[in-house]
Image (cartoon, grey):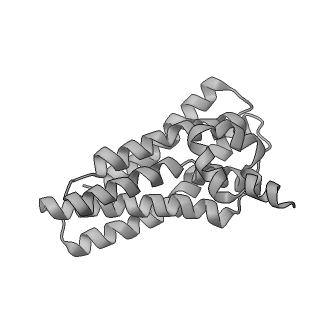
Amino acid sequence: MQATEMRRHSPIRTALAMILNPGQVVKNALQNVPLPFCLGISALAFTLFFMQTGLDMRRVGTAGTGRAIAFTFLGLGLGTIGVAAVAAIAWAAARLLGSERSLQWTVRGFSLAYTPTLIFVVIGLIFNLAGGWNTAIAFGITGALWALYPLLSIIKELTGEKLVASLVLATVCGALILSVWAALGI
């Protein structure tokens, strides 16, 4: 591969492109991004999101240091195993609709869809640590919601551009991820 082509398909550039132009990434570059890199994006996003939530809970007195640390590791689990499991559910549903995409492609796409979440939680964590703000809802949830647009693009590709099926699947998948966060935070 030539140097220009390598730069055009670099994993970081592809991940950032998922924010503004996920359809293009899905069609042209997703298969070139290594699976561990993709899972690293969602793992880091949810680890930091759950860390931010744990810090907020500790600050308001609903969790001690141990629970805040444990919550951070739960985020790591959700960002890897949870995202992969939800991707597998979407993949299985899309197979019923005739999809020929692989499970690995689907997990890559779902994992990279959480690039906006990663960006939001990093910014939120800065405000959390530097300003003492409670930021999990303002930044973490907002980032998770921003991930729905790239997620919809992935699912549209999976379903062969079947919009209604894609919207339903994207809603279910997004709700599953957010429900796990909400249930664990109680």
Q: Quadrant of the N terminus?
A: bottom right
Q: Position of residue 114 (x, y in %)?
A: 52, 50
- In the image as oriented, which residue stretches furthest toward the top? 164
154 displayed left or right of 46:
right
Rendered view: 115 above or below 169: below
The residue furthest right is: 1
Q: Quadrant of residue 151 in the image?
A: top right
The percent position of residue 108, horizontal first and vertical second, equals 66, 54
Tell whether 173 sits left or right of 153.
left
The answer to whether residue 20 of the structure is visible from this angle is yes
Please name whichever residue, 173 or 60, is drawn nearer the observer in this view of the structure: 60
| Residue 7 located left or right of residue 76 | right
Question: x and y percent of residue 149 in the render?
Answer: 54, 36
Q: Residue at x 70, y 44 (%)?
A: 25
Q: Is residue 184 visible?
A: no
The image quarter containing residue 186 is bottom left
Q: Nearer the viewer, residue 86 or 111?
A: 111
Q: Residue at x 76, y 56 (%)?
A: 32
| Outermost residue to the left | 61
Residue at 54% over, 55% down = 83
Q: How many marks?
A: 0
Residue 38, horizontal then vertical, whole percent: 62, 59
Q: Quadrant of residue 59?
A: bottom left
* Residue drawn at x 67%, y 45% as measured from the top left: 92
Whether 139 is drawn above or below 72: the answer is above
Front-most of 26 and 127? 127
Residue closest to the far front: 4
Q: Does 65 sit above or below residue 142?
A: below
